[in-house]
Image (cartoon, rainbow, N blue to C red):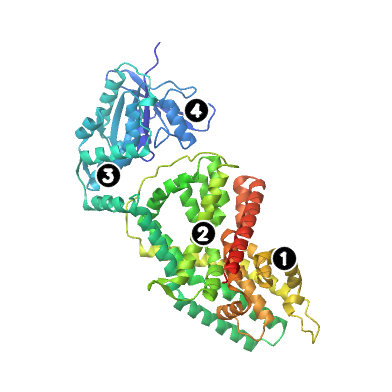
């Protein structure tokens, strides 16, 4: 007895494929797993108009015949008749989203080229018409050379005609798929898909036309990267240019609180702990809140407007050159805020080795916690002047530090993908969202959440670390009349002397040695630690950012400051980053590897920076 013809339902994710499958099969479905894998197999039965039964199998959504995930691999193997426990399909129903035709036609063109009878379901045609898009289904049929049926699965529109076309397809002689006929070049497929989409579009709204026009510029192979670079440049310029006034307000507030505490509390250890440790240390970090909010305002606007996904598309080719795909861009971009969510976001990368490489380089993306360190050093040593009459030098240096981090990550990826995480780029496809104006309320909410996270860190990790550091810097005290510095005589001072032996060759001094260990708790603590050291060393001086800057200019050389910046570009991030790496890699092997290679890289880069700066007389 011949089995019922098998119809494979294929298409991109979110094309309404499962809804159409349910509408055609009703309750006559079976759900199980494909042999040997955890991918679900959805199968059902449908009766044709002449009473013949056919079996339908709903394949996992896929973007192409070049799989980048286990789901896509199963889809490809079923369509090519290579999947264990599955018959070769007699025909394919390709479900495409009518409102996203140019993207969905890429996969359709590949499937038609296999030579198996194909019926195209132009699904969700009602939503496309609602958005002002009118398509000519007959013209699409002529362009593709296969039957096309307009459907609305959730309203059961077009199902009778679709069944009739499926009847015609399974009545044809069975053909074996020929993969060699399918085009695999993404750009060739995309170009042909756009040509067809344009040819079958009868009318569309002005919004859709503007979207296409904007995309032709921001996704242009030359103009697109230039625009992306320009946006990043403006963002980092704004971090300095727009934050000066609010930083002054916060600094005045911190100074007022410190003076008030000094006036109320009697002279002694408690006043020193409150003024030098808590207010001086935490206040030195909180003052950078405006710069962090400006940075996140840009990121939130770019995400909400729909540009960020296009930036990922632009970066795909760059990522591929270092063994990654565009899928790695979003986790790495998230790492600019914090490496912890960035590393967690790597779960979207299906290739395990590519995912591991992305985790290992994520700490090289400059997280917001480094911003206080960068800005205070830049503010102390880089003149506040313009280059070329309009470009701020401080913003330019900050931009350069971010670029150094990105280049370091790309270089590390290139090396990792050729050694311990060897493998080729898996490639990726992503649907472009519509452009839209960011909602003001959403933007405010996002900034409020970021401010709370930052202030919570300042009130917990940074506060506790600062108090511990103050205690270690305050005890034991030197004998009365001794000319030894209280910091040098303290527990922390003596520990730093041991660290200083190791870091002195790369230009680091006692102040930096004291800051390196507490900075592992949170990067911002480096600023608080330096501020606490100066407050204890010179208790008569005022606290706050200006006092730290004054001390930095008196105690540090420019080569030391540049080496310190370079250290923070490449050094491992906080303990939280190491812990999340351990959780995501299920062991300590890769976290220890990450810490080791990043410390080595930071030491070498800081040393090269210091020695070069000294050699050229800076």
Report the Cα–Cα distance between label 1 and label 3.
65 Å
Dot 3 or dot 4, earlier in sequence: 4
Residue 369, compared with residue 133, is above or below; it is below
Q: Residues within 10 Å of mark 3 (few under 14, many from 20)?
A: some
Q: Which dot, 4 or 1, sits closer to the camera?
A: 1
Q: Are marks 2 and 3 in contact (CB under 8 Å)?
A: no
Residue extending farthest to the right is 479
Give the x, y percent position of residue 268: 72, 85
Q: Secondary structure at mark 4?
A: loop
Q: Which residue is mark 2?
A: 404
Instruction: Name the residue nearer the viewer: 134 or 294.
Output: 294
Q: Secondary structure at mark 1?
A: helix
Is any atom of residue 460 visible in this view?
Answer: no
Residue tagged by mark 3?
127
Residue drawn at point x = 27 percent, y = 18 percent: 50
Q: Marks 2 and 3, how far apart in space?
A: 46 Å
Q: Which residue is mark 1?
A: 499
Mark nearest the camera among 2 and 3 is 2
Residue 72 spot, x, y in % from top left: 44, 34
* Residue 142 vs residue 179, the one in the foreground: 179
Q: Which residue is situated farthest in the left direction here?
A: 202
- Cα gap from disc 4 to disc 2, whole angstroms: 46 Å
For marks 1 and 2 on the same chain, the one whose residue lies earlier in the sequence: 2
């Amino acid at each position: 007895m011949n089995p019922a013809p098998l119809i494979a339902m294929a298409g991109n994710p979110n094309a309404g494929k499962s809804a159409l499958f349910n509408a055609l099969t009703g309750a006559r479905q079976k759900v199980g797993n494909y042999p040997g894998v955890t991918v679900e197999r959805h199968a059902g039965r449908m009766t044709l108009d002449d009473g013949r039964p056919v079996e339908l199998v709903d394949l996992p959504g896929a973007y192409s015949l070049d799989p980048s995930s286990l789901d896509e691999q199963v889809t490809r193997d079923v369509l090519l008749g290579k999947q264990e426990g599955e018959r070769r399909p007699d025909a394919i129903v390709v479900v495409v989203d009518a409102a996203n035709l140019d993207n969905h036609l890429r996969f359709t063109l590949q499937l038609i080229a296999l030579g198996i009878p194909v019926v195209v379901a132009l699904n969700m045609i009602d939503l496309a018409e609602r958005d002002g898009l009118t398509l000519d289904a007959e013209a699409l049929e002529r362009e593709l050379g296969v039957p096309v049926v307009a459907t609305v699965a959730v309203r059961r529109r077009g199902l009778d005609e679709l069944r009739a076309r499926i009847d015609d397809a399974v009545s044809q002689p069975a053909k074996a798929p020929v993969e060699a006929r399918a085009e695999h070049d993404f750009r060739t497929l995309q170009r042909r898909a756009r040509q067809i989409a344009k040819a079958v579009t009868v009318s569309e709204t002005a919004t859709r036309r503007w979207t296409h026009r904007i995309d032709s510029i921001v996704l242009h192979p030359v103009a697109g990267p230039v625009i992306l670079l320009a946006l990043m440049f403006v963002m980092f310029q704004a971090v300095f240019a727009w934050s000066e006034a609010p930083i002054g307000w916060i600094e005045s507030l911190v100074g007022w609180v410190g003076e008030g505490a000094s006036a109320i509390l009697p002279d002694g250890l408690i006043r020193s702990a409150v003024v030098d440790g808590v207010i001086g240390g935490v206040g030195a970090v909180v003052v950078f809140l405006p710069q962090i909010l400006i940075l996140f305002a840009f990121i939130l606007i770019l995400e909400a407007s729909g540009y960020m996904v296009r930036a990922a598309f632009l970066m795909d080719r760059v990522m591929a050159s270092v063994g990654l795909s565009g899928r790695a861009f979003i986790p790495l971009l998230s790492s600019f805020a914090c490496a912890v969510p960035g590393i967690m976001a790597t779960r979207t990368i299906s290739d395990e080795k590519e995912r591991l490489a992305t985790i290992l380089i994520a700490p090289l993306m400059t997280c917001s916690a480094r911003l206080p360190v960068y800005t205070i050093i830049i503010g102390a040593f880089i003149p506040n002047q313009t280059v070329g009459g309009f470009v701020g030098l401080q913003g330019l240096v900050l931009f350069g530090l971010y670029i150094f981090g990105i280049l370091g990550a790309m270089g590390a990826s290139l090396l990792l993908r050729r050694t311990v995480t060897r493998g080729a780029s898996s490639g990726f496809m992503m649907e472009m969202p519509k452009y839209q104006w960011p909602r003001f309320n959403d933007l405010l909410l996002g900034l409020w959440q970021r401010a709370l996270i930052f202030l919570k860190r300042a009130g917990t990790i940074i506060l506790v670390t600062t108090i511990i550091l103050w205690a270690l810097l305050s005890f034991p005290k030197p004998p009365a009349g001794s000319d030894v510095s209280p910091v040098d005589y303290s527990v922390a001072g003596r520990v730093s002397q041991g660290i200083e032996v190791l870091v002195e060759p790369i230009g680091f001094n006692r102040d930096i040695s004291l800051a390196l260990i507490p900075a592992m708790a949170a990067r911002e603590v480096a600023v608080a630690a330096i501020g606490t050291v100066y407050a204890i060393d010179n208790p008569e001086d005022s606290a706050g950012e200006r006092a730290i800057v004054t001390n930095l200019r008196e105690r540090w050389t420019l080569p030391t400051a540049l080496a310190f910046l370079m250290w923070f570009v490449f050094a491992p991030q906080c303990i939280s980053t190491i812990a999340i790496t351990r959780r995501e890699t299920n062991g300590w092997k890769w976290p220890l590897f990450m810490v080791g290679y990043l410390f080595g890289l930071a030491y070498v880069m800081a040393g090269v920076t210091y020695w070069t700066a000294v050699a050229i007389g800076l």
